[in-house]
Amino acid sequence: MLDIQKIRADFPILSEKVNGKPLIYFDNGATSQKPQVVIDAEAKYYQEINANIHRGVHTLSQLATDAYEISRVKLQHHINAKFSHEVLFTSGTTHGINLVANGFASILKPGDEILVSSLEHHSNIVPWQMLCEKTGAVLKVIPINEEGELIISEYESLLSEKTKIVTVNHISNALGVINPVKEMIAKAHAVGAAVLIDGAQAVPHLKPDVQDLDCDFYAFSGHKMCGPTGTGILYGKEEWLNKLPPYQGGGEMIKEVTFEKTTYADLPHKFEAGTPNIAGGIVLGTAVDYLNEVGFGNIQLQEKKLLEHATKRLLEIEGLRIYGNAKNKASVVSFNIDGIHPYDIGSIVDKLGIAVRTGHHCAQPIMNFFCIPGTIRASFSFYNTKEEIDAMVEAVKKAKIMLS
Amino acid sequence: MTIKEIQDEIIDEFSMFDDWMQRYEYIIELGKSLPLINEEYKTDDNLIKGCQSKVWLQGEQKDDKIVFTADSDAILTKGIIAILIRAFSNQKAEDIIKADTEFIDEIGLKEHLSATRANGLVSMIKNIKMYALAFDAKNKN
């Protein structure tokens, strides 16, 4: 069992006040807070080993390069990738998805199909729409049921030899639904399609095993898993990364440059043009160490308790509806109260010191499905407590009275 | 009354409240007095971009003044647009163009001006000023 007070002491921001009240932070789905070890590691990098990587022979450059590459290996082990060169540093999930979508421009032909799900974040929709415009490929959408679950039978009937890539999130950001990705990947492979998993919302809650899932690509962000903003990972199977052309040209990604012809560097550098976010990449490794020390078993146990408590307490409020009631769900509660705009509730709850997210959560198609302008989303992390949830419930009740 | 006088009156009213809750309750009250936009004007053209909630705003010239009507699907937003309309409706275009909006700060709604509120209030003010600019240009021609 986690000693929550001890864990909370690791996160300096949790003792801050907002609007004169102790901060209650339930916007973990947008970004997580950072533990002191992560904050310190960032400063330590700049204080002690800052240098550009993969070029200098001087000692500092080697120290920085080593730290960066050690972090890559940490991430490789964390997601159980076969090789460290299958682990690309990116600026975040969006960057990773765009890198793959851009690469597929050289593969797709008019009439080829791309399957996305109705649960996707805009960042896993728009790059594929842009790809369709470029190539003449067609975007097909896997529908959801009233509980917010993907309808697998519909997915099966959408799959065909025309399907070239399936792209779906591991966990939905707007509803918290955990998708049966392993099963979906196997089905896509059966028709010869590649699969990209958007793991942005999954990595704070679980340790993905990319070999067990057998996904072709897995993209995620560092900042949602206690790491720095502007960091992320794109995992890609070696054969796919060799097949895709480079995303950006520049330094670091080349083997040899002449004005007649340039040859590209080997993996992973082929996809890492320019000076990367060195500090961020290194510190992402620190964040992963921290999470593994807390333990994903412990994290899941605590988050499950929080989700159950929040669901039960919120449903006490008359007229409150929770969207996304899948059996398999992460610690996210997306809700509305009959006849009240989510923006109104969010504004009042914020005044009471509670950070929740309101709006469409960059997933407008889901909101359209439920015919709502948006929801209030409370997303919990292992450092949150039941007492904080009780405070939120009281705040929502107060808002309801004010707004009715 | 001039825009400035109305703004001062609003500041006066809000100064009676000690805390944000009373202020918010008053904003909700003010929303109920909003001169509602005619249903036929609730079009995409009149929808203000950049708000989490929907806000429709319509301006019409009556004699030498501009009359605004509006609506929103969120109660607080309705109150906020009601405050703006109270200050700027039934005023001359040139006065609206010149008017400042510091009273928003003084009645404690500053946070609604921030970018994280998706610039809703900023867009509302901008749209009001755009109407004034458009009518002013038309009158001068």
Image (cartoon, helix red, strand yellow):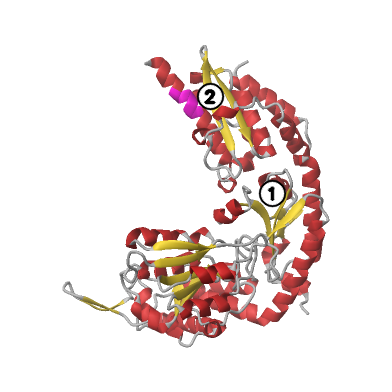
Q: Nearer the viewer, residue A157 or B69?
A: A157
Chain for numbered disc 2: B
User: SS of the residue at dot 2?
Assistant: strand
Residue B135, horizontal then vertical, whole percent: 45, 21
Q: Which mark is residue A346?
A: 1
Question: Relative to the observer, which residue lies in front, A280 or B54?
Answer: B54
Residue with the most extreme right position:
A316
Magenta region includes residue B131 = yes
Please provide percent x and percent y for residue B75. 69, 38
Of all chains, the one bearing label 1 is A
Counting from the top left corner in percent of width and height, residue A219 is at 50, 72
- The amino acid type of the residue labelled 1 equals Gly
Q: Is residue A110 above or below residue A345?
A: below
Real-space Cα separation, disc 2 to disc 1, in angstroms:
30 Å
Quarter of the image that includes the C terminus of chain A: top right
Q: Residue furthest top?
A: B63
Q: Nearer the viewer, residue A237 or A387?
A: A237
Read off the magenta span. B129-134
Q: Nearer the viewer, mark 2 or mark 1?
A: 2
Q: In the visual, does A316 lie left or right of B14? A: right
Q: Secondary structure at mark 1?
A: helix
Please give the residue where the numbered disc 2 appears in the rendered image. Answer: B59
Q: A329 left or right of A260?
A: right
If the image is split into quadrants, where does the N terminus of chain A sit? bottom right
Magenta: main secondary structure equals helix
> Vertically, is B133 above or below A333?
above
| Amino acid residing under circle 2 | Gly
Please report the residue visible at 65 percent of the width from the left and 29 percent of the height from the top: B83
The crowding category of the residue bearing disc 2, from other C-alpha atoms within 10 Å (few below 14, some 14 to 19, many at least 20), is many
